[in-house]
Image: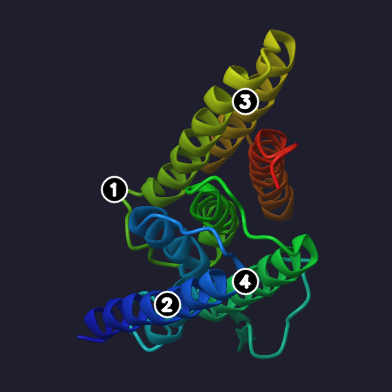
Amino acid sequence: MIRIYGMIGGFLTMVLTGALWSLDHRRQNSEKSSAGRLIIQAAGFGFLPAAAVWNAFKSYDGVLSKGTALISTLPAVPWLTQDGYYIPCRIDLAAALTAFIILCIWLICKRKNLIPAADLLLISVTVWAGIRMVTESFYETSMLTVNGHPVLRYAACAVVLVCLAGWSVRREKRQKNTLQLVIDWTGALLSAAAVVITSEKVLTTGSEIGDFALISGAALLMTGITLIVGADCRKGVS
């Protein structure tokens, strides 16, 4: 039941924060936006706090809350670790809240809300997928594991690539740059491949900390490339 409560709590959080964002958007902008545009952007604004609430509930799940033993050479962090084990739900909760705070600061600094309807949602989804690629290493039991394969991590890779594809198409329509497109996709695909083959132990550095660093670095690079392509799409848009 705790998972159902968590999903309901996350959904209500997304609705509430999204509604607050929509009210503020209408107050600051004289131009009327369509209901569909507002719903998509509101969902994007509420996505990360909803993820935080979901993980707050998930931390009480006896199965999903179990973490792996601390990676050697990495220090124990109060509240995020306990008795030599990670508390993965709290790590995800902290990461989601941190990402949300950064997103809010970025929006405040930008002073104007994003014009493209889906951008706020794509940014939040991309960031969360990048986070989950990394934090999946801390879970003893994933929500989605098939025969020992971390399917949830691979799904996160696919989500980032889908977001990259959407932004790439939009950027190419604005300014065609085949070389840049090839560079971006080469980096993203190589990163995704590194995540998969390291997770499957096809490629290993020979140490737990080395494999974790490789997966984290590849996830960060793939997420960064995707967000940069998205930023390119918004150049000149105010």
Say which residue label 2 marks.
19
User: Which structural element holds mark 2?
Assistant: helix
| Amino acid type, callout 1 | Val
Earlier-in-chain disc, 1 versus 4: 4
Q: Where, by quadrant of the figure, is residue 29 drawn?
A: bottom right
Q: CA distance from mark 3 to mark 1?
A: 36 Å
Residue at label 4?
28
Residues at badges 3 and 1 in contact (C-beta under 8 Å)? no
Which color scheme is applied?
rainbow
Marks 2/4: CA–CA distance:
14 Å
| Disc 4 residue crowd, few under 14, some 14–19, many 20+, Cα 10 Å | few
**CA distance for labels 1 and 2:** 37 Å
Residues 40 and 26: in front is 26
Q: Which residue is mark 1?
A: 146
Q: Tell me if residue 61 comes above or below residue 212 in the rendering.
A: below
- Tell me the residue that label 3 is attached to: 171
Does dot 1 land on a helix, a strand or a loop? loop
Q: Is residue 220 left or right of residue 40?
A: right
Return the x and y of residue 142 as percentages of the image width and height.
Answer: 38, 62
Give the secondary structure at mark 3: helix
